């Protein structure tokens, strides 16, 4: 803040004063500096990192909303309290039984398989169909199954990766893992026991 002379009476007044305190003469004040935003939008310029982030978050939220399954629950308490449909009895249909148990068996078996890696492991393509791509009867009378796959790599001590195959013997009635075998290489065809 500086002192200037009043244009009417000549007394010293502040350069910020709108009028002279001695004679009351209005003073001309300089226009305030233009307060521009720190990152003004430039026509034809690249978007800022913040703008990219905001757009990215908006796209992710939109995709999540779009991909969320819509449930048709109907109205009334009867629709809300309805029990989930029971699993169909597959009888001797091995494909039906496999489709019923492959994900629950995969959760149980996957942990045991991963513990067998000495260094590191990497699942290659199991997110859509699960970890098993072959199946067969272990004991048809006991209704136990062999579930197998080769969607896995183990790393050795030198950092090289090897494709591994695995077989899990599973009892669907007891929801129990009976045995796990892991070997190197692609999966050979399972020959069911007779």
Image (spheres, rainbow, N blue to C red):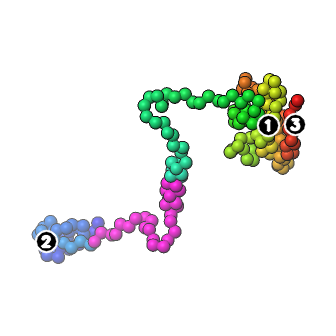
Give residue 191's mark: 3
Residue 76: % across, % down: 42, 31
Q: Secondary structure at mark 1?
A: strand
Mark yes or no: residue 145 visible.
yes
Characterize the local packing of mark 1: few (<14), some (14-19) or many (20 or more) Cα atoms within 10 angstroms: many
Mark yes or no: residue 120 visible.
no
Characterize the local packing of mark 2: few (<14), some (14-19) or many (20 or more) Cα atoms within 10 angstroms: some
Dot 2 corresponds to which residue?
Answer: 25
Disc 3/disc 2 C-alpha distance (Å):
107 Å
Q: Depth-wise, is mark 2 or mark 1 nearer the camera?
A: 1
Most common SS among magenta residues: loop
Earlier residue among tags 2 and 1: 2
Establish if 94 lies above or below 7: above
Horizontally, is 168 left or right of 16 in the view? right
Residue lying farthest bottom?
Answer: 7
Q: Residue at x 13, y 71 (%)?
A: 25
Along the line of sight, the residue nearer the viewer: 31 or 17: 31
Disc 3/disc 1 C-alpha distance (Å):
9 Å
The quarter of the picture where the C terminus appears is top right
Can residue 115 be found in the magenta stretch?
A: no
Disc 2/disc 1 C-alpha distance (Å):
99 Å
Give residue 135's mark: 1
Task: Quadrant for residue 27, please give it.
Answer: bottom left
Residue 14: % across, % down: 23, 67
């Amino acid at each position: 803040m500086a002192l200037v002379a009043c244009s009417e009476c000549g007394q010293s007044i502040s350069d910020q004063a709108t009028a002279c305190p001695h004679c009351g003469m209005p003073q001309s004040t300089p226009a305030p500096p233009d307060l521009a935003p720190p990152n003004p939008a430039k026509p034809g310029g690249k978007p800022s990192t913040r703008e990219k982030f905001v757009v990215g978050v908006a796209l992710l939220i939109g995709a999540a909303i779009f991909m969320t399954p819509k449930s048709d629950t109907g109205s009334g308490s009867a629709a809300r309290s309805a029990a989930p449909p029971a699993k169909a009895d597959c009888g001797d249909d091995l494909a039906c039984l496999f489709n019923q148990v492959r994900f629950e068996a995969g959760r149980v078996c996957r942990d045991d398989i991963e513990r067998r890696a000495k260094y590191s492991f990497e699942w290659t393509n199991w997110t859509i169909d699960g970890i098993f791509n072959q199946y067969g009867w272990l004991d048809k009378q006991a209704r136990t199954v062999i579930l197998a796959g080769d969607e896995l790599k183990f790393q050795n001590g030198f950092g090289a990766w090897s494709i591994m195959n695995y077989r899990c013997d599973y009892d669907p009635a007891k929801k129990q893992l009976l045995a796990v075998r892991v070997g190197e290489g692609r999966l050979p065809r399972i020959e069911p026991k007779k």
